[in-house]
């Protein structure tokens, strides 16, 4: 290393960085277009916007598969191999090689087919969901499954075709490791739901039910997130039908939420979730700007941050105590007669439900386990698309004990399959598991974190996450990041222990 440090970097490094900067710009532009599309664009712009996005995607792919990029990497790899793994330039070369090789394995024709069929699949899904008729979605879905088989076949060395799909969202993750993880999780969660579920309960125990003006809700959310780290100079909060977070570039973090007049939790907890995503993006180091490393380690790691703020912190006792005071100040009269313990118990209410996005923390991973099972069965050829609705309903009955009344609240509820996002769902569960492991470690390092949260003091918490998660950007693979942050491999026990302790502490399950 000492030798490498004395040597001037090879001239190819500058050229590689220039090319990667342009590709990073394209990604940022793509994010801006998509943010606009999902917030303020009039619906009439959809067709042209799809063309804009396709052009950006084609330019990106073109740049990524450029043989010159491959030659630059060939020239730089021996030099990078002599450098420390944590060195920015070594990581830059390593991840550029991975992206270049993956892109070149897939014929341009297939990339185009996937983009076009995603748009078609999405329209077919919208129509099917509106009418509740799976038959309107059947052909588009069959085409998506066929395309995923074709995509997986581009990587003949993969141990399992599903590994190829997973790797796009969770680099290095494998079916072989996920299968036992989900089996163990399901076995432990089912009895827990049995004990904790309350058939008559309202969402969040009804604590957030009332009448809330939309402007008041937004003001309250901005004030609370402002206490937590949302900065007006660099963040935005806008309404959108589906909440999301995006950061097109340094100093520009955009989160969204949606509102319902009769339930403040609907907007608030979505905003808290997206705040966790936003804080990760805000914490990516400025030194990685316009590189392939100014990105998350994986979608699972990203979700670990959003779930940490939404659930582990946001539905924890100390935070609830602080939050109640702020809510009473910001929304006078709406939280009279509620105490901290009631708020805490309310937001941890367990209900068996049909819809994943509205499900509580305890049942949530059972919804994901079902999707993981079905995706594997489709990819392994054990399940035909025509049999999917029946398999869905049987799975919901077995895993969650609910009888699905219609496909609209069953197999048609998620957008993911319509646009070809197979292998995506497991990242939600990975995020949940990682958030509990990170939290366990964080509590050891910051022994008075509960007192800090009771006071509404979030600085040390943010610094810990910045140091152990955010500052790495995409330099570390997700499992490596977790290992360094916690000293552990990925496992389900910390999540289960955290959940059991909370449900008991909140008085939802007996001690
Ligand atoms: Zn999320």
Image: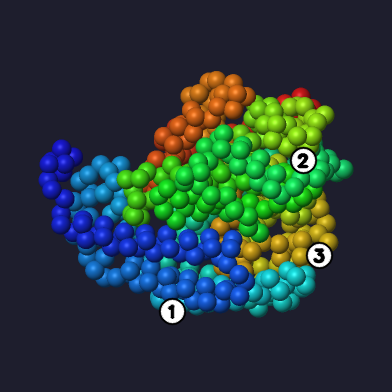
* Residue that carries the numbered disc 2 in the rendered image: 208
Front-most of 13 and 489?
A: 13
Compared across the picture, whether 79 is left or right of 85 comes to left
Name the residue: 42% across, 70% down: 56
Q: Secondary structure at mark 1?
A: helix
* Residue that carries the numbered disc 3 in the rendered image: 406
In the rendering, at what x and y percent does residue 245 appear? 54, 52
| Residue 425 in which image quadrant | bottom right
Looking at this view, name the residue that lies furthest to the right.
200
**Mark closest to the chain's N terminus, 2 or 1:** 1
Cα distance between the residues tagged 3 and 2? 28 Å
In the rendering, at what x and y percent does residue 32 appear? 48, 61
Q: Does residue 194 appear in this view?
A: no
Mark 1: give few (<14), some (14-19) or many (20+) Cα within 10 Å.
few
In the rendering, at what x and y percent does residue 18 appear? 26, 60
Name the residue: 42% across, 59% down: 28
Q: What mark, if any, has residue 462 been given in the picture?
A: none
* Residue that carries the numbered disc 1 in the rendered image: 109
**Location of residue 452 with respect to 416 vertically, above or below:** above
Q: Secondary structure at mark 2?
A: loop
Compared across the picture, whether 506 is left or right of 416 comes to right
| Residue 479 in which image quadrant | top left
């Amino acid at each position: 290393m000492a030798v490498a440090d004395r040597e001037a970097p090879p001239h190819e490094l500058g050229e590689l960085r220039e090319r990667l900067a342009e590709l990073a710009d394209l990604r940022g532009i793509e994010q801006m277009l998509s943010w606009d599309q999902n917030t303020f664009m009039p619906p009439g712009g959809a067709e042209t916007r799809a063309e804009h996005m396709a052009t950006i995607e084609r330019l990106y792919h073109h740049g990524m598969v450029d043989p010159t990029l491959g030659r630059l990497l060939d020239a730089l790899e021996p030099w990078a191999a002599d450098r420390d793994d944590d060195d920015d330039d070594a990581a830059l070369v390593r991840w550029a090689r991975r992206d270049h090789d993956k892109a070149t394995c897939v014929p341009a024709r297939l990339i185009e087919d996937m983009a076009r069929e995603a748009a078609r699949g999405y329209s077919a899904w919208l129509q099917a969901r509106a009418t509740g008729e799976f038959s309107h979605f059947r052909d588009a879905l069959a085409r998506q499954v066929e395309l995923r088989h074709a995509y997986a076949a581009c990587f003949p060395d993969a141990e399992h075709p599903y590994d190829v799909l997973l790797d796009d969202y969770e680099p290095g993750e494998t079916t072989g490791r996920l299968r036992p993880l989900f089996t163990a999780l399901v076995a432990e969660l089912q009895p827990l739901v049995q004990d904790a579920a309350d058939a008559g309960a309202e969402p969040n125990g009804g604590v957030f039910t009332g009448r809330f003006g939309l402007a008041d809700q937004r003001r309250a959310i901005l004030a609370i997130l402002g206490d937590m780290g949302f900065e007006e100079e660099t963040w935005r909060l806008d309404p959108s039908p589906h909440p999301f977070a995006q950061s097109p570039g340094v100093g520009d973090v955009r989160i969204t939420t949606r509102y319902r007049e009769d339930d403040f939790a609907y907007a608030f907890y979505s905003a808290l979730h997206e705040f966790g995503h936003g804080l990760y993006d805000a914490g990516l180091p400025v030194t990685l700007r316009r590189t392939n490393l100014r990105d998350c380690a994986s979608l699972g790691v990203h979700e670990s941050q959003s779930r940490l703020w939404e659930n582990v912190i946001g539905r924890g006792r100390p935070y609830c105590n602080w939050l109640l005071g702020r809510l009473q100040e910001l929304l006078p009269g709406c939280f009279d007669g509620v105490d901290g313990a009631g708020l805490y118990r309310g937001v941890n209410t367990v209900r068996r439900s049909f819809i994943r996005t509205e499900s509580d923390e305890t049942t949530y991973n059972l919804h994901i386990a079902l999707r993981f099972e079905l995706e594997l069965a489709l990819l392994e050829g054990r399940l035909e698309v025509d049999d999917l609705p029946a398999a869905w309903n049987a799975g919901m009955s077995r895993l969650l004990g609910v009888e699905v009344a219609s496909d609209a609240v069953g197999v048609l509820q998620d957008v993911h399959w319509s646009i070809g996002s197979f292998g995506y769902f497991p990242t939600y569960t990975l995020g949940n598991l990682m958030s509990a492991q990170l939290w366990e470690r964080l509590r050891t390092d910051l022994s008075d974190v509960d007192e800090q949260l009771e006071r509404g003091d979030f600085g040390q918490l943010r610094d810990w996450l910045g140091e152990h998660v955010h500052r790495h950007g995409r330099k570390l693979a997700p499992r490596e990041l977790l290992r360094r942050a916690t000293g552990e491999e990925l496992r389900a026990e910390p999540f289960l222990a955290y959940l059991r302790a909370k449900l008991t502490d909140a008085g939802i399950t007996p001690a």
